[in-house]
Amino acid sequence: GLFQICMLAVVAVASAAPQNKPIAIIRQESEGPNADGSYRFSYETENGIRGEEAGQLLNAGSEKEAISVQGSNSYTSPEGQVINLIYTAGEQGFAPQGDHLPTPHPIPEAIQRALEFIASQPSTPETPGRRF
């Protein structure tokens, strides 16, 4: 009766649910961390995702210790576009590059001249207590 119809409906809905098969990693290599702080890894999946990264320790043991990294990733977007990202990261921050990334508008000439003028002026330390 009604129970069998409800069970049939539940089974039908469960069967129609998307079956998410895990994506296999077809290549994976890694090295490190090494004694000098360096490392390297790379991978590739069966659906075409690729990545690699290498890093090295800078100024080991000092207050300015940092890691310098270079890497890349690539994959195909849902729209079919191959996305390639190349990046560096370190003391100056994260710097990605890729055709898919937005580019900033050019700085207007008058603003650029003003920025150059400001940068050319000597800095004056702020005097405590003199805030306006």
Image: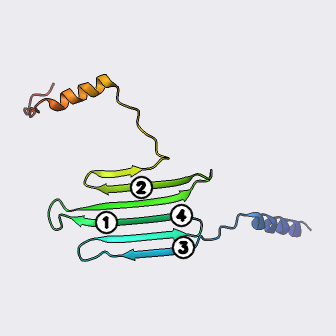
Q: Quadrant of the C terminus?
A: top left
Q: Left or right of 88: which side holds 49?
A: right
Look at mark 1 in the image and give the residue it sits on: 55
Look at mark 4 in the image and give the residue it sits on: 49
The label shown at residue 25 is 3
Where on the picture, by quarter, is residue 14? bottom right
Look at mark 2 in the image and give the residue it sits on: 86
Give coordinates of residue 6: x percent, y percent.
Answer: 84, 65
Where on the picture, by quarter, is residue 104? top left
Q: Earlier in the sequence, mark 4 or mark 2?
A: 4
Residue shown at 15%/61% (left/top)? 63
Marks 3 and 4, Cα distance to the nearest angstrom? 9 Å
Marks 3 and 1, Cα distance to the nearest angstrom? 22 Å
Marks 4 and 2, Cα distance to the nearest angstrom? 14 Å
98 w.r.t. 53: above or below: above
Q: Left or right of 22: which side holds 104?
A: left
Q: Earlier in the sequence, mark 2 or mark 1?
A: 1
Marks 2 and 1, Cα distance to the nearest angstrom? 14 Å
Q: Earlier in the sequence, mark 1 or mark 4?
A: 4
Q: Amino acid at mark 4?
A: Ile
Residue at disc 1, secondary structure? strand
Foreground residue among 66 and 107: 107
Residue shown at 29%/25% (left/top)? 111
Residue at disc 2, secondary structure? strand
Q: Earlier in the sequence, mark 3 or mark 4?
A: 3
Foreground residue among 93 and 125: 93
Q: Residues within 10 Å of mark 1 (few under 14, many from 20)?
A: many
Marks 2 and 3, Cα distance to the nearest angstrom? 21 Å
How is the rendered protein coloured?
A: rainbow
